[in-house]
Amino acid sequence: MDQGIRNNESLKDTGILILQRILPHYRTGVFKRLSERFRNLTIVYGKPAADESLKNEKSPLPNNFVEVKNHYPFGSSKIFFSEVFRVVSLRKPKVVISVFNVGNLNLYRLFLLRKAFGIKLILWSFGYDPHRGFQPDKNFSDKIRLMMCQNADAVIFYWNKGKNEVEKFSKKKEHYFVAPNTLDTEILTSIRTRLDSAGRESLKRELGITEKHHFVYVGRLLEDKQVDLLIKAFGLFCGETGDGRLTIIGDGPERKNLEELAHQTEGRIVFAGEIIDEETVGKWIYISDAFVMPGRLGLSVVHSYCFGTPVISQKKDFFYHGEGIGYIKDGFNGFLAVDGDIIDLARKMTMIAEDSQLSDRMRKYAMDTIVNECSVDKMISGFEDAIDFVLKKAE
C-alpha cells in the first residue's frame, strides 16, 4: 500500500469538527460525503440571524450534525458567536475546521485555547471580501484576516484566486490549500443520468412547457443577482424570436419588484418560488437552453453544469463574482455578456437557443467541467490534504 493510501486510511478515524455559522440546504450533501470519508466527523451549526433570507436545511439530519445556539450581538449575521465549546469538550476533536471571517468571534477563542484543547485549527474561507477584494495594507479587517491566515495551522480556500490573493501578502504559504467549492456533484449527476433516460422533450411536456426555448434562473432573489437585467434581456429575446419562457426559481426580498417588472412580458415569465427537491429543480435546469444569472455567481454554476446546461452571466470587475466565475470558459461552457448590456445578454441567449451545434458543444463542456474541475471528490481531496498536513506537523 503506498503512502498516500496509508495517509487516507489513517485520516478516516481522526476526530474532526467542522464549525459552520448556519447549515443551508446546499451544504448538507457535501458534508454527508465528508462524513463517509471521515467516520469521526461532527458538523456544528446554529440558526441564521433573524433578518436573513438564507435558511437552514429543513430535512432530518444524521446524528453527527449538531445544532448549537448562535448569538448575534448586533443583530447582523456579520458578527456572531456560538455555544460550541461544550461540543468541543465532549467530542475532543483533533482538528477543528471553522468558517472563516473576522466577525466569527469563535475564532478568537479557538486561537487562544487550541493548545489547551489539543486541537489543530484550519480556517475555511473564500479568501477575501468578495465585495471589495483584499487589501491588508489599507483595510483593518483584512489585516486581521491576514494575521489569522498566517497563524492558523492551515487554511482551505474555496478557489485558487482566493489563495493567490492572500499569498501576495503572506510570508508563510505552505499551509495554504484549495478545496474547490462545490455541491454534491455525485448525487446531482446521478439525477442527470435518470433525466437522460427520459429525454428533454418528454420532461418539457411533464413540466407543461410548450415553448421551443426555455431559460431558467435558480437562486435567491437579491439585488446583487441582477435578475432585473435577465427579465429585460429575456423581453428582448422574445421580441426577436417570438418564442420563449423563463422560469425563476427562488425567493427573496426583490421578488415583488421583479414580478412587477415581469408583467411586461405577457406571462412568459413564471415565478416558481423556492423549490428544495433536487430532482424537481434538476428537471427545470436540464430542459433549459441556458441557466442565466447576470449578477454575482457562486455555486449556481456547478448546479447548472451537473445537468449539462450552459451558464450565461456578465463580465464584471476583478472581485465581483464568487468562485463560480472560475468554472466558466467564455464561449465553451457558457457566455459572459458585456456588463450592464441587456442587448448583448439577449444576444448570448439567442446564440445558444438557435444554434443546436453550439448548444450541444457547450453542454458537453459543461459536464466535462464537473469531472475535471469541481467534483465533490476534488473538494474532499483538498480537505484531506489540509488535515494530513496539520496532523503531520503535530507528530
Image (cartoon, rainbow, N blue to C red):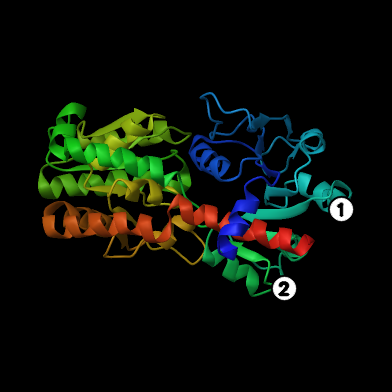
Give residue 392's position: percent from left, percent from top: 72, 62
Residue 180 vs residue 373: left or right? right
Q: Amino acid at mark 2?
A: Lys
Q: Is residue 43 left or right of residue 234?
A: right
Q: Quadrant of the C terminus?
A: bottom right
Query: Can residue 105 be spotted in the picture?
Result: no
Distance, label 2 to label 1, CA atoms, is: 20 Å
Residue 80 image-quadrant placement: top right
Quadrant in the picture for residue 354? bottom left
Q: Quadrant of the N terminus?
A: bottom right
Against 364, residue 137 (above or below) is: below
Q: Secondary structure at mark 1?
A: helix
Q: What residue type is disc 1 on?
A: Lys
Q: Is residue 13 above or below residue 146?
A: above
Q: Secondary structure at mark 2?
A: loop
Residue lying farthest to the front in this orientation:
1
Crowd class of label 1 (few under 14; some 14 to 19; many from 20; radius 10 Å): few
- For the point 78% across and 60% down, the residue is 394
Which of 264 and 6 lies nearest the eye of the viewer?
6
Camera-nearest residue between 185 and 224:
185
Q: Residue at x 43, y 38 (%)?
A: 221
Label ID, residue 115: 1
Q: Is residue 316 shown to the viewer in this render?
A: yes
- Residue drawn at x 76%, y 64% is 393
Q: Provide residue 176's location: percent of width, then percent of height.
A: 64, 66
In this rendering, the count of numbered labels is 2
Q: Which mark is residue 172?
A: 2
